Amino acid sequence: MAIYQVTDNEIKTISRTTFSQSGLKEREDLQRLLKHQIEVISPETLVVAEEFGEWDESRRRIDLLGIDKQANIVVIELKRTEDGGHMELQAVRYAAMVSTLTFDRLVDIYADYIKQNELGLDAQASILEFLGWDDKEEDEFAQEVKIVLASAEFSRELTTTVMWLNDYGLSIRCVRMHPYESEGKLLLDVQSVIPIPEVEDYQVKIREKRQKERASRSGGRDTSRYSISFNQELVYSQIRKSDIGYCTVQLLNEKDLINQRVFEFLRADNTCAFQLLKLESEVTETNKKYNKYRVSREPELIYDGQEYYVARNWGKESAQAFANKISARFPEITYSQHSD
């Protein structure tokens, strides 16, 4: 659709151009400008890295890496081409690669970006302020990786692929950037193509409905939560399955119930297919990659001068089995399950 300039005597067409014709380059110009005003294509986003590519056996780099107000990772890809190429598939690969980033790792990444751009900021304090957090909340961090694709145009093949991927739970936004020339000035028309702003809420609701229907047909993902009581007094309310081992160990420790026999009982437990308690030196790189133990935090149990971390690999059946096992050993501790 054309853009027009209205004067006293006429409605004048403003000529559309291309990025290549206007001399704008993908990295040197678009990326350089957008990283300082990322809200143009991705509102409520903090850019934390440029040309990010810190992974093994790959020379691929993310144009811009960010985080949004909900603490989701945001992968931003820019293209000057007229159809966007195959940027959606490239961005999905990038999203997979950064999906395991921890809060502490993101702080380190942002610190490097701050240094490179001479921003003079404290990385962790800036991220916490942006998120509105008093302290890091690892459980709420990076629950989703979102993708923003920005290009002069998108092919039908690309948009069809994006809509299909979004329907299956991904969050990909396509932003079209059309350059125009008028009286020696370069103008930029920025429009959201997917989702269409006027029906975005509707599209999100339809996508969520379809996802729930698919989950229902397949048995669904268990999102139940647990509460833990001690002598019928509620101690932990509505915790995630991933925290059932951690909260149980904390409760036992707080109630001074961990003696040598109990410690050996906990150390021997592998109900969730992982050893319940591990020293940091026992946590493998694979364990760390998939956050099976949160070694980036302070030690979760200190016993006999040794620092231990608690396994987080709980499913519905293993969580219930663990609850039964603990209640059998400690009748004063009871668990209740809550379904969504």
Image (cartoon, rainbow, N blue to C red):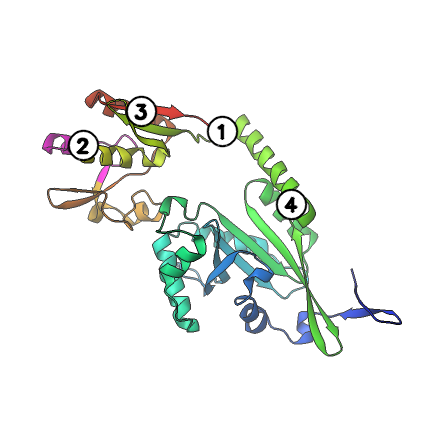
The amino acid type of the residue labelled 4 equals Glu
- Number of the label disc, if any, that sits on residue 200: 4
Task: State left or right for residue 175 relative to residue 75.
Answer: right
Q: Quadrant of the N terminus?
A: bottom right
Cα–Cα gap, marks 4 and 1: 25 Å
Mark 3 vs mark 2: which is more N-terminal?
Answer: 2
Cα–Cα gap, marks 3 and 4: 40 Å
What residue is at 18 percent from the left and 32 percent from the top? 255
Cα–Cα gap, marks 2 and 1: 37 Å
Which region is colored magenta? 255-277
* Labels 3 & 1 near each other (Cβ < 8 A): no
Does dot 1 land on a helix, a strand or a loop? loop
The amino acid type of the residue labelled 3 equals Tyr
Q: Which residue is mark 1?
A: 220
Please state which of the two labelled residues, at mark 4 or mark 1, is closer to the viewer.
4
Give yes or no for residue 264 being in the magenta stretch. yes
Above or below, 174 against 269 in this view is: below
Within-10-Å neighbours for mark 3: few <14, some 14–19, many 20+: many
Mark 4 vs mark 1: which is more N-terminal?
Answer: 4
- Which percent across, then down, holds residue 271? 27, 30
Mark 2 vs mark 1: which is more N-terminal?
Answer: 1
Q: Is residue 196 visible?
A: no
- Number of the label disc, if any, that sits on residue 335: 3
User: Image quarter for residue 214?
Assistant: top right
What residue is at 41 percent from the left and 73 percent from the top? 118
Above or below, 14 against 294 in this view is: below
Q: Which residue is mark 2?
A: 255
